Image (cartoon, helix red, strand yellow):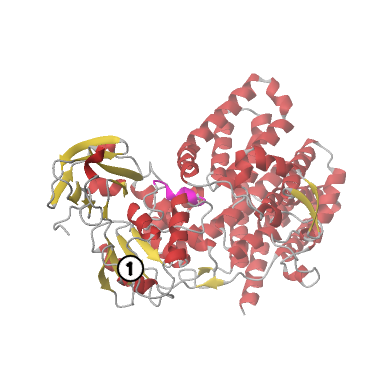
Amino acid sequence: MDHLLQIAFAIAAVSAMSVVALRPGLRTAWRETLVLLGYALFAVAATGMWRHPAHFFLAGEDPTIDTWTLMRVDHNLLRQPLDPFVGNLAYPEPHPVLFADPLFSLALLVLPLRALTDNAVPVYNAALLCTLTLAAYGFYRLALRLTGHPGAALFAGVIAAFMPQQMHRLYLGSLTYVSIGGLALVVLSLISLLERPRLAIAFGAAGAFFLQASIGGYWALFSTLVALLVAAWGWRAFRSLETWKAAALAAALAGLLLLPYLSGFAEVRAAADTNRGGSWPELLSTDLGVHPFCSYAYLWSRVLPDPTVPGGRLFPGLLALVFAGIGLARQRDRYTGLLLLLGSVFFVLSLGPHLHFAARSLAPMPFLWLKDHVPLFGTIRTPITFVLIPLAALAVMASRGIASSAAGRRPWLVALLLVGGALEVLAPLPRLEDRGDPRPDVYAFLAQQPRGGILHLPTEALPEIRWAAAVHDLPMVNIGGFGFTPRWWFDLDRFIHKEWYVRPAHQNMQDWRSTRFLRLLPVRYLVLRPRISGYLVSHVEATPETFSRLGITASGYRVYRVRRGDAGARLRRLFGDDELRAGPLVAWVRGRANARLDAQLNGRPLPPHALATNWQRIEWNVDAALIKRGSNELALSVQPPDSARDVAPATAPSFELYDIGSPATTAHP
């Protein structure tokens, strides 16, 4: 039944757009409205979004990442628009949204809906439909500019936005990779800029670049390469000073719009390893013997083989290939040269580090050198993504072939070609999933506690954690599955998996390396999921010095308060900036009489205090100027350095730090 509804939606979409093909004299406003409506209906047909759009969205891990990102960016735009990339994962990193793709322009598109609802499902679904519609419409506008034929241009929009490689990304549920409409607008605006350098066009080019580049790192790189290639293609235009002025203005405006993204990404590079090397680029490159001969479409999937290597399917359809060939033969002008330049460069890059044929590596390719010598290429995990540009260029070339052929002079025949092209890309519906209630009772319980970082175990429950974090505002230490991950999270996750699940049960973990590292981080609460496997729960219960149980919720979540106390002559602890701004730093300490406790916050001194053998409460009111965004380090040490020599650390350490942080503790240990 769903497949019949899908076909019905697709026929309705093509019929709406066919009015444009059959009525070439239609007024522009009506034409553009019908085109947008037709592409939107086709996006509904491709995604199956008529099926419970308020409760179901695409299955898989990527949709939970994209949903959290959209919800956080829109939340920030509504409440603190000057700082759009803060979030409640990877606490206390200052801009955790940028560990994923920020989807900023998509968040802007769905901001009105987000202002009306806290339901993350329709926000994600609306963003998906918007970006697919924009992708189709963008390449329609580019093809219309290069052909002047509305009916033929419609063909390009359908093929470019819903080609098999796009469907591959749709099945993964990735908003990032299906968002290609801005690339068409970048090419379109830059062509106009080179041919008619005007102030308004420069603003339009900057806006188009921002629209695409602000979606994610891949598209920032792709947009830059596209802009450079278009500039190289139109190099003669730069003999005019007006072109230089307009191009400089467009570049400056685009850089200014992207400045928050770029500055935030600099923080990400400092906190995480952004080189995503290893074997992934080799595995996820275009294989000339496999990928071009595979398709998801109903019409071709039974004829063409399934791919034997990962990365997707690239067969664009027979009509697209035939009419692209006709366009190449008949339209030998400078625009054909531009499409060939864009297509050939990006196709070579899509081959990855080595040329592959039927899973055999044959020869090194330029990507290998770029990956080793150009930092941004080191972040590319899936070189096959570059092939989206050649396939989109082929779709535009096919529209030029239709416009220049005898079919282009017969509107009814153009309409038939549009129907044929749509059927050649129409593919089975992606799987949808109801994620259930994103607000388990544990987060309501934590909302009643003093605010602080939360570690949720097991760490493998990533979709559940992100899905909940999309709708609550509690600071989660967890992160994972994003494009980049802070180094400290790798260490914590590795230590916990190595030590906390081991037998026998009921081991005290107080002096384990994992527990010591955990106490360093700004973790105030530990949450254990119901029915957690292994020996983890018993070990936590056997370590009351660090983990004091606060309660067990009705659904079975266990919540513990993490006591970050320790003993020694030198201690380090990390705090989030929100903790430090919420109140004074408080510590209960004791040590050798007449010794002095020195403290530094981020390398800046705090007032010293004298130690005594009995417990005493020390409080620092931290100057806001000493607090930096994200993680702040408190370092404590005893002076003079030899004051601990006569003290047995096991019984009378130089000082003991028990419950430091805000709000202030009300009782000593």
Residue drawn where x is 66% and y is 46% of the image: 141
Task: Indicate left or right for 105 with 663 as reference.
Answer: right
Question: Which of 196 and 604 lies nearest the eye of the viewer?
Answer: 604
User: How many numbered discs sit on the rendered protein?
Assistant: 1
What is the x, y in percent for residue 267?
A: 45, 41
Q: Is residue 360 left or right of residue 381?
A: right
Q: Nearer the viewer, residue 508 or 266?
A: 508
As shown in the figure, which amino acid type bears the numbered disc 1?
Asn
Q: Quadrant of residue 14?
A: bottom right
Residue 2, compared with residue 326, is above or below; it is below
Residue drawn at the location 59% of the way across and 66% of the way down: 47
Residue closer to the observer: 474 or 190: 474
Q: Is residue 604 above or below residue 74?
A: above
Image quadrant where residue 552 sits: bottom left
Secondary structure found at label 1: loop
| Residue 85 seen | yes
Q: Position of residue 510 (x, y in %)?
A: 32, 62
Report the side of 12 relative to 650 (left or right).
right
Nearer to me, 202 or 516: 516
Quadrant placement of the C terminus: bottom left
Q: Judge left or right: residue 150 versus residue 65.
A: right
Q: Residue furthest front?
A: 646
Q: Which residues are magenta?
A: 94-101
Res. 473 in view: no
Quarter of the image containing the N terminus? Answer: bottom right
Q: Position of residue 444 (x, y in %)?
A: 29, 67
For disc 1, the neighbor class at 10 Å (few under 14, some 14 to 19, many from 20) is some
Residue at image mark 1: 508
Asked whether 462 falls inside the magenta stretch, the response is no
Q: Which residue of the protein is positioned furthest toward the bottom in this rendering?
A: 1
* Image spot of residue 80 (x, y percent): 34, 45
Q: Examine the structure image and report whether residue 95 is included in the region drawn in magenta.
A: yes
